[in-house]
Image (tube, grey):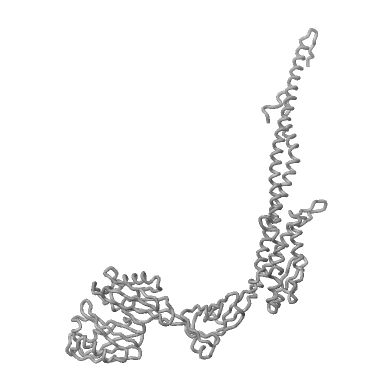
Amino acid sequence: MVGITGIGSGIDIDSIVTALVNAERAPKEAQLSRLEKATTSRISALGSFRSVISELSTTLQSLNKLSAFQKQTVSSTNSSVLTATASSDVPVGKFSLQVQQLASSSKVALQSVTGGSAATFNSGSLTISAGTSSIDVDITADNNSLLGIRDAINTAGSSQGISASIVTDASGSRLVLSSSEAGAGNDLQVVATQDGVTAGANSLKALAFSAGNSTVQLPTVAGGAAATFKAGTLNIVSGAVNLGVVIDAEDSLDTIRQKINTDGAGQGISASIETVDGGARLVIQSSNAEDLSVTATTDDLSAGDNSLSTLASTVGSNSKTIDTAQSAMFSVDGLAVVKSTNSIDDVIEGVTINLVSAQSADDIAANKTVDITISQDKGSVRSNLQKFVDAYNKLVQTTNELTAVVPVGEGKRPVTGPLLGDTSVRNLLSGMRKELVQLGDSLDVQSLAELGITTQKDGKLSLDSTTLDTALAGKYDKVAEFLAGEDGLMGRLEAVVKPYLGSDGVLQQREKGLQTTISSIDKQREALNLRIEKVQARLYSQYNAMDMLVGRLQKTSESLANQLASLPGFVKKSN
């Protein structure tokens, strides 16, 4: 609207100009809207078309590799005993294994002490070793508690696979050491050396440990090595050894040590004396078994400062081996193998064997084996071919929808897909169908039909798994030759698809052209708006001029009428 219009003539100029402008704009605006809608629809359709082509291309690429047909599958007849994996180039075969023993690492429980994690030890050093791994731990006044020693071991052993924890049972608290070094000869050993700088409630030597040995500290007695005991018998039991040491009245602690060493010579039993705060104590060691116990019978009426029963040890207080470091022992097709690990990759070339558990003695005696079978991975090929069929069918389904013609009633124009008549769609499908029916050069496999893949009436593919399994079982290598490689079916199909994808592909060029059309529509709308503005201004100018002229004419008419009315003899008619 340009100011206030129609005053002179009383005509609704705004409505007239608006109607004329809309009539001028409508045809071109409708044309541009139709073109924009069609172009946008085609861009969207090309995006959908590109998506299904890209999905098919990915499937073709995965099948157009000989490696896709060289995968192996490995199975074990008893996965609770062992499992296996294989590289792709391992030939098919079968191996029979027996597993007598798993590899394991060392774990030991050291001597228990009273006082919990706060129990203290004399200062010095601990050397802890397991095979080629070894650490030295200094024990000072700052860390001579059971907790401090644990933390010092864990700090020093973090890079050597040696760790410690504290376990408390009925006999007291103790360090439990673990090593990650598996294999025979890698048992944990602990050597303790005291420096006499700081005294604790326990001798540091109580933490010493030698593989295959058990050690127990007997209770501390006042008076040191000279303390005397009443008569009786010390019974020391270790494995199959049951040593009875007769103690006479007023035998000293040192005399008892000597008798134990004399009676235990040749039986793996020995004794020593440790001096600690509050007195001294006997330390009994056995090389016979993990368990070591000391009991006493005493004649408390005999002479001596102490009852012999005070030397009895608390059950379970001695150090012992929890797990022995040992090597894996198994056989492959009757050939004996010994390894320090349960994951073995250097026995069967290209195959990694993972031992899970040892077979029972009865199974070993009955010569029962666990078989590893290496075969071609036909399931992977079957799965990939099904993906190809699915991707191709999705392409056919999508193109059918994008080029469809749907009747909507007699006398009405049908609804058509955005890519109806598009040469890109037609050329792609034509090229692919040509390759699908082309016979291969191999005399063993010449067509997809021999693999159970056939074309249906609607243009889609169908896969018969029974026919495919038969082909894979009898012509596995020839199937690979037919499908893979530059001259293989997948390679030829990939060559058909490739020109449509990429930054300079057919579809990209098509989309660029359509985007240019969208830009042109925007420019045409701008030009239309400018032209309509000029038309509107012109119409207002013309109608306003008319309005002014009519207004002046009306005023002239009124003036003439007034003049005529004032002339002599003019008789004004009355109503």
Quick one: 34 or 283, which is closer to the camera?
Answer: 283
Is 305 displayed left or right of 295 in the figure? left
Is residue 115 visible in the rendered structure shown here?
Answer: yes
Quick one: 11 or 521, which is closer to the camera?
Answer: 521
State the count of labels.
Answer: 0
The x, y position of residue 38, in whole percent, is 73, 49
From this view, report whether residue 432 is shown above or below residue 568.
Answer: below
From this view, report whether residue 352 is shown above or below residue 541.
Answer: below
Query: Residue reaching furthest top?
Result: 568
Is 182 displayed left or right of 386 in the figure? left
Quick one: 545 or 387, which is closer to the camera?
Answer: 387
The x, y position of residue 416, in whole percent, is 76, 54
From this view, report whether residue 566 is shown above or below residue 237.
Answer: above
The quadrant of the image that shows the N terminus is top right
The x, y position of residue 303, in whole percent, is 17, 89
Quarter of the image for residue 25 reads top right
Is 362 displayed left or right of 428 in the figure? left
Q: Residue at x 56, y 85 (%)?
A: 96
Q: Residue at x 73, y 24 (%)?
A: 545
Quarter of the image for residue 208 reads bottom left
